[in-house]
Image: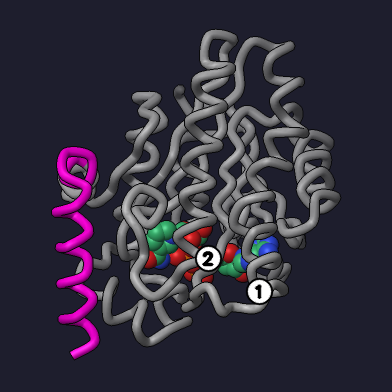
Amino acid sequence: MELSGRVVVVTGGGRGIGAAMVRRFAQEDPRGLVVGDVDGDLAAEVAREVGGLGVTVDVGREEDNVRLIDAATDRFGPVDLFCANAGYAIEGDEQTPDVEWDRMWRVNFMSHVWAARRLVPEWLARGEGYLLHTASAAGLLTNLFALQYSVTKHAVVALAEWLAVTYGDRGLKVSCLCPQGVNTRLLDADEKIRRLLAPVALEPEEVADRVVEGIENEEFLILPHPEVEGYFQNKANDYQRWLDGMRRLQRRLLE
Ligand SMILES: NC(=O)c1ccc[n+]([C@@H]2O[C@H](COP(=O)([O-])OP(=O)(O)OC[C@H]3O[C@@H](n4cnc5c(N)ncnc54)[C@H](O)[C@@H]3O)[C@@H](O)[C@H]2O)c1
């Protein structure tokens, strides 16, 4: 899909990958850019830079996702591309309290369902629409030290696949963005996650360039780190060997 003349919404657009996507999309002459972020000041600042609309939203609440899409539609017309990008990472395991599982489930995963719930019927009626899900390489492989992050990102990949299969013949386009490390504030959240991802981190601008290319080519899987495709194939080809390799990596990182 060409971005020129389109109405685009990016959640988590106040910073990091989302802000880089907004700035990169602005170079493609869209009709309207809408930046949603829980930090309303950041959203407003990025929106101001690109002549767009900033909206304060907590994507972990369905009503905020609906309000964001309604605000975009009121200002610029029907949404063409929705980037469900907001998310966060923390360390966690099976002992992580339910309240933290619940929060991450809503922000990292249900937000994508709520956006689709609001937009898909309108897009099917129109015969076109584009959803970009920011998942992670953690959604294809796993993220050492971060159980609920890995689970929510796997869920995003599963949702994206399902939507692409179910509605692809009726005009819905779906992309699933699966970066490994990206040099953003997310890496500061946790020392172990930083140690794992910082050595392979790309800059958010590099990811945004790859996203524009992926959308133009309507690619399902957008992999800013091309090596992730090889890891994904290794996992499918020999699961047992892949698990052994991940344990070796974990041992090395814990030494
Ligand atoms: N940085 C990485 O290494 C990396 C790798 C793979 C995937 N990702 C994914 O990329 C996405 C963006 O992360 P980032 O690296 O740019 O991190 P970031 O922390 O720099 O930016 C995230 C943005 O989302 C906003 N946000 C957080 N919770 C929100 C909520 N409930 N409602 C609305 N906005 C909210 C934050 O305010 C921030 O502006 C996330 O989904 C993340 O999981 C990041």
Quadrant placement of the N terminus: top left
Is ligand 1 within 8 Å of the beta carbon of the residue shown at mark 2? no
Amino acid type indicated by mark 2 = Gln
In the foreground, 191 or 132 = 191
What span is colored magenta in the figure?
233-255
**Which residue is denoted by mark 1 in the rendering?**
100
In the foreground, 138 or 181 = 138
First-in-chain label (1 vs 2) = 1
Note whether residue 188 is visible.
yes
The spot of residue 28 in percent (x, y) is 45, 35
Against 78, is 245 above or below? Answer: below
Against 249, is 63 above or below? Answer: above
Using residue 70 as the reference point, say whether residue 193 is left or right of it: left
Amino acid type indicated by mark 1 = Glu
The spot of residue 110 in percent (x, y) is 68, 49
Q: Within the magenta stretch, is there residue 121?
A: no
**Which residue is denoted by mark 2 in the rendering?**
148
